[in-house]
Amino acid sequence: MEDREQIYSKRVRAGKRTYFFDVRSTRSNDYYLTITESRRHPQGDGFTYEKHKMFLYKEDFDKFVDALKDAVDHVKTELMPEVDFSQFEAKADEVDVVGESDLKWD
């Protein structure tokens, strides 16, 4: 599937990984989200990047967000209640917003 016009993008840097959350439009002016994980690997004098992408469509937004929240909450409260997860909060240089738009996701 060819990527369409990018409307909004948020980049989250996480060590050797970077996550991209991109809102794109279809030919019929509908919107979908791509989530890309990019991992950097040393190769010779430079780096190579391995990318994994998933497409999330509007009819699945709420189910996806609910399942992600449930899974994260389970890890935080049931599996690792002793961990202070606030120590991992994103620093200003780890999250970038590109091409902000008026689109809002609840």
Image (spheres, rainbow, N blue to C red):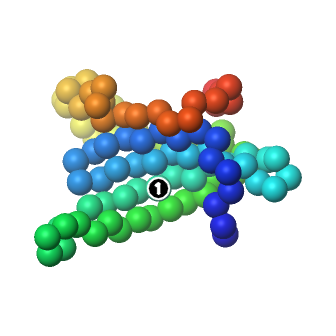
Residue shown at 53% from the left, 41% from the top: 9
Looking at the image, the residue that sits furthest to the bottom is 44
Q: Label 1: how many residues lie within 10 Å, few (<14), some (14-19) or many (20+)? A: some
Residue shown at 67% from the left, 69% from the top: 1
- In the shown orientation, is residue 35 left or right of residue 58? left
Instruction: Determine the image quadrant of residue 94.
Output: top left
Residue shown at 37% from the left, 58% from the top: 38
Q: Is residue 18 above or below residue 7?
A: below
Q: Is residue 73 above or below residue 15?
A: above
* Residue that carries the numbered disc 1 in the rendered image: 36
Instruction: Determine the image quadrant of residue 23.
Output: top right
Q: Is residue 27 above or below residue 8?
A: below
Residue shown at 72% from the left, 49% from the top: 25
Looking at the image, the residue that sits furthest to the front is 45
Of the residues shown, which amino acid type is indicated by label 1? Thr
Tag 1 secondary structure: strand
Instruction: Determine the image quadrant of residue 46.
Output: bottom left
- In the shown orientation, is residue 37 left or right of residue 15? right
Residue nearest the observer in this picture, 61 or 16:
16
Q: Which quadrant: the C terminus?
A: top right
Q: Position of residue 76 (x, y in %)?
A: 32, 34
Q: Position of residue 42 (x, y in %)?
A: 17, 68
